Image (tube, grey):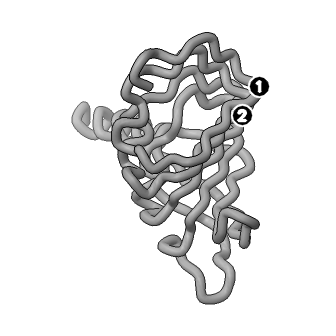
Amino acid sequence: MSHLILILIVSALFAVNAEKIECEFIEHSPRGYACIVKDMEGDSITKIVGKHLPGKSNDDVLYFEATSKTLEFIPQGIHEQFPNVNGLKFNFERLIEISENDLKPFGEKLTFLSIFVSAIEVIPSNIFASTSNINYMFFASSSLKSIENGA
């Protein structure tokens, strides 16, 4: 009986952290086919809900935009659900940090990064080591105080 209770508790903990998100799929000018998430929660994306435009799939998504009033980090799994994403926009009021590990899964495909209304204070060194093809980066309404050498 105690093993069953432990399994249920562990399952409940993972259920809180894994998240399905609801995308509004649109043709976004100029970014291309996009997934727009209105209220994102959870630390990893495990399932996508939403109706694709005719003839489109997750593989066609080039741009991912999400809004959150509570998340303090970038959820994992975006690149697994949308393997061809080359643009990211986060409207996260409480985003406190961003690291190379957040961007590394997107690799050289990532060309566009935009972060709005965040609490990020420091851009760490080597954050873009794996994403050297970024040609547009925008941080707005943030608490940015410094950019470390090598960023």
Residue at the image position 64 percent from the left and 70 percent from the top: 33
Total residue callouts: 2
**Mark identifier at residue 116:** 2
Q: Which residue is mark 1?
A: 141
Q: For the residue marked with disc 1, what is the amino acid? A: Ser
| Quarter of the figure that contains the N terminus | top left
Q: Earlier in the sequence, mark 2 or mark 1?
A: 2
* Residue 113 placement (x, y as % from top left): 59, 44
Q: Dot 1: what SS?
A: loop
In the image, is residue 130 above or below residue 98?
Answer: below
Q: Dot 2: what SS?
A: strand
Q: Quadrant of residue 69?
A: top right
| Quarter of the figure that contains the C terminus | top left
Residue at the image position 51 percent from the left and 47 percent from the top: 134
Q: Within 10 Å of the Cα at label 1, are there few (<14), some (14-19), or many (20+) other Cα atoms? A: few
* Residue 55 placement (x, y as % from top left): 60, 88
